[in-house]
Amino acid sequence: MNTRTRRLVATTSVVALAVLAGACGAGGKDDDDKSGGGSAEVGVTDDSITIGGTFPLTGVAAPGYSEIPTGAQAYFDYVNANGGVNGRKITFLVKDDGYDPTKTSSLTDELVLKDKVFATLGSLGTPTHNAVVDQLNDDEVPDLFVSSGALAWGDDPGSHPFTFGWQPDYEIEGKIIGQWVSENMPDAKVGLFLQDDDFGADAEKGVREYIDSQVVETQRYTSGNTDVGPQIAALQASGADLVLSFSTPAYTALGQLVSLKLGYTPKWYVSNVGSDPNLVGALLDQFSKGAVPGSASSLNGVMTSEYIPGIDQPDNPWVQLWKKVWDQYGKDGELSNYRIYGMSFAYTFVQALQAAGKDLTRDGLVKAIEDKGADFAGPNLAPYRYSSDSHFGISGMEIVELEDGVGKPLTDVLTTDVGDADIAPDDSGQADDAPPASGMPE
Amino acid sequence: MRRLAAAAWRITLTRHLVTAAAGLLVLVVVMESVDDFRAVQLTEMAYLGIAAGGLTLLTGLNGQISLGHGALMAVGAYTTALLVSDDPVVPLVVAIVLATAATTAVGVLIGAAAARLRGPYLAGATLALAVALPGLALHFKGTLGGEQGLRLRVPETPGWVLETAFFITGHDLTRSKYVAYIAWLTLVVVYLLLANLARSRVGRRWRAVRDDEVAAELAGIHLGRARVSAFVVSAAAAGAAGSVMALAVRLTAPTGFTLTLSLGLLTAVVLGGLGSLTGALVGAALLTFLPSVITDAGTSMGLDDIAAAELAPLVYGVVLVLVILLAPRGLVGGIEAGWRRLRHHRHPVVPPGSITTSDAAPSRAPVATSKGDSR
Amino acid sequence: MQQFVNTLLGGITLGMVYAAFALALVLIWRSTRVVNFAQAPMAMVTTFIALELIEHGQSYWLAFVVALVSGAVLGAVVERVVVRPVEGGPELNAVILTLGLFIVLHAAAEVVFGNRYRSFPAAFGIRGMKVGDTTIALTGFGIFTILAVLAVMALLVLLFRFTDLGLKMRAAAFNQEVARLLGVRVGRLLTLGWALAAVVGSLSGLLIAGGSLVSPSYMDTVVVYGFVAAVLGGLDSPVGAVVGGLSLGIALSFVSGYVGSQLVALAALAILMAVLFLRPDGLFAPARERRV
């Protein structure tokens, strides 16, 4: 062999070794078939169910949202300690995608192909979840209760039969606040401050159904760019005296901060997902070292909406249940609205598992939610809309004004649906539900 | 017969073709012995490897640095995503070729600008490119999908592919493995072309320009042309890589092409050894498979999951700095040097020319030679 | 009109920060012919040190000073331990090395401080000033930013023009061999140059963080804008860096306010390419031949 041959042989063997090392190195072989016993469904055994979800535990969307999976986890621990569902304990795998859609895609591959989850639950974010919704439906993995109000989760069960929304979609939130403004502030000049994706677009669609002519300016921010000065300056220049803000919590805080800098004092409405007074207040408090009135009161006078009871209602039986669960099974930190949110969809998930019965299959779970989901009791103020034609979740909300962190209702619970459905006060009595004594759905 | 084989072996193309065929064989064996999740990881290794292969020629053979290869991959990925939407305009192979062509065109533009810059100026300008280009996707939201990017569905695997695969391996080909095969076939084709180019006259010109501009110019080499051609070839590889990435990730969004990607590619080629295709592949393998090992180690050391996930880039960064300081030839270069020393020890008489004729650089390319540093 | 004034004022404040950052790059370039791409994460790390102190109840100003001092230490250590071996070697190695440092510091900060957004307080008011009955976007902290950068510039001019040390540093930067023959201890001065530059870089980090959100990657785009500003002024000229930073800040602020914030980085790239083609030596360097 001459030198070249030798080198070539060496090169080839290095390549082969690298590929082989890659193939069998990191992590070792996967377990062949985890499902023992009678059940053949992926991720389900006689005594366990494995599910997972992607959440931003780091990055610009992490404040607040990173607490959601801890709430869900605490509730599952509570359920597991009380015997699980049909004798099966729930394992909830949480992956951090940093609100980066590209990462969401590869992490979902990991959940489905490597961890072999039965379903995904509560995966968070509009741009992020958009990246994987096709993937999950192609693989026929139930994709439950996405933590986002985009229309894409519920409006097309034909092409996304395995995906379900949970919270009210952004279009009906836009419709409800739009109608309220047209009736109560008909002279207001309205500015829109929107996240530049389906979140902002869906909400804008709902708002414009009622007050298209009142909107004087629309500004969009890109998640990740923390300089919103130019956008707020443009809203100010337009003379808008009511700003409807569909933003995540960090951007609500940045918007408030820049307005302060510019001396801009319109009336604000902040979307439910970005309006947690404690979180936004804490962010603002730190910015200014006390120059802005501290914590929760910094959002005084700001309007928002509610669709589940939050920590501002300590006497609500649901909140008392969540408090009990968090005290027993919570990790670090206090109970927050985000943790309550996580517990609430976890509760709905347990309900769905029960409805699907002892022989748990992916198809069976989807069918159970479609058939029985509209009648699920729970903390939601308005009923779910689940059926074989619609995978939308909660159908309504009430508008509130914040006062020292407490929401004072300005309206009844109003329900509606996407499109030209009317807005009407809810008459189902859903808001009066109380949890069963066991704390588990019955 | 032996002599005939030896003669054929001496022809570069034959050698490379034989290597490629051997590589394909290994590929099929490996692919059939792994599960779907490993196949997905191997796909990632393939597209990183393709891009790193292009970058290693640019930086190792021609001495130009680029922090903008992530942006070039974005060009390839977006082109692919536009061509292969829910209702594919063209077959998959054509889409990959077109994406490569589009990126090549962009590469001509950038290469022409880059040929006038060197060292830190080139690094700074390509850095700005990496940061700036995703902004276009946000601006042209209608076509390029903005923040949410473009979703892509890999078309149904063609029937004849399924049948062939079943005929050879005896079981059904899954979608993940189909994509993995596409990725690795692309890699083999790209590497074959790059290896031949590096050994050709073009490659020798690139090296001449890198080693000594004045001498190269005296020898009649057009400096600008040599630089631009190196950049264009490298851009084409990045385009093919981006195209494969779009198929693998099934989403093309600005967040996929951040500075982290460009820096990761640079890390891969420096770790592997600048100028060496083998090194680029090893670097890509490290980039793909090492993080989970490091993260597991971090978790077992008591770090929480999130901190442990950040350990991998930390290790890469430290190793990158150490390689530059201690072993500028990278892993492959270092191993080869050790191997040769061992051999010299055993055979004191070295046939003349055996080292000096050594080819596509891995054995002797100093990391980034500058003027006066050539040997 | 109000929007125009506010966009301009925002641009000036931001421009001063870019100027400080560009100044840091220029100081290092002059002494060691290295563009320090790790300047951004170095400033980020010192800002996080300040934030940790503040969150543990220390005063803003103590944290401010500690951050600057730790910047100096970090700069000196980096020069001595990491950069020294490649100084004068192939320039590609130095570039890759500072990029390696970029990755290391970034990842280390994510492990130590966590990869999340945290709010960083401002030392002065963050309410805009009232002129008549309109509010303009000039805050107390904005004024402090402008004054701080001007003061640093003045101090540097004093140092280089009127002190013995400054003269030696200029000599060492101008021609190491000659300076060495003249008895100047070049090695020490190079270390000092890096330390000084890191202090200025840390200052820019603190100024841009004030009253905003910080995360381990909050300085990443600043390194691009700082580099563009430095090239705009000619990498060798401190005054050029400041003017370059200021004009870049204003230009980008108008792009953001009137065209779209997503195009800001692209505008910076366009400006960079235009300058490199039309005046490769920057706007402030004396005309002479140089290959870039």
Image: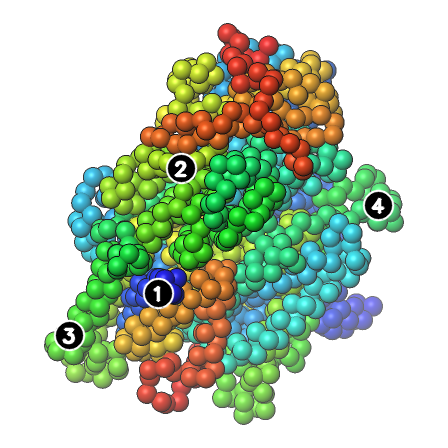
Find residue C20 and report its horizontal and vertical position in percent.
Answer: 29, 66
Q: Label 2 is found on which chain of the structure?
A: A
Task: State the separation of the CA atoms marked 1 and 4.
Answer: 65 Å
Q: Label 3 is found on which chain of the structure?
A: C
- Confirm whether residue A270 shows in the render: yes
Of badges 2 and 3, nearer the viewer stands 2
Q: Are marks 1 and 4 in contact (CB under 8 Å)?
A: no
Q: Secondary structure at mark 2?
A: loop
Category of crowding for the residue at label 3, using alpha-carbon neighbours closer than 10 angstroms: few (below 14), some (14–19), many (at least 20): few
Identify the mark at residue C5; answer none if there is no mark. 1
Q: Looking at the rendering, in which quadrant would you find the C terminus of chain A?
A: top right
Of badges 2 and 4, nearer the viewer stands 2
Circle 4 residue: B162
Of badges 3 and 4, nearer the viewer stands 3
Task: State the separation of the CA atoms marked 1 and 3.
Answer: 33 Å
Is residue B16 or residue C157 the one in the foreground?
C157
Question: Is residue C197 left or right of B370 when viewed as pictured?
Answer: left
Circle 3 residue: C158
- Confirm whether residue B267 shows in the render: no
For the residues beneath circles 1 and 3, the answer to whether they share a chain is yes
Look at 78% across and 62% down and name the residue there: B94
Circle 2 residue: A302
Task: State the separation of the CA atoms marked 2 and 4.
Answer: 60 Å
Question: Is residue B19 left or right of B307 when viewed as pictured?
Answer: right
Q: Are marks 2 and 4 in contact (CB under 8 Å)?
A: no
Q: Are marks 2 and 1 in contact (CB under 8 Å)?
A: no
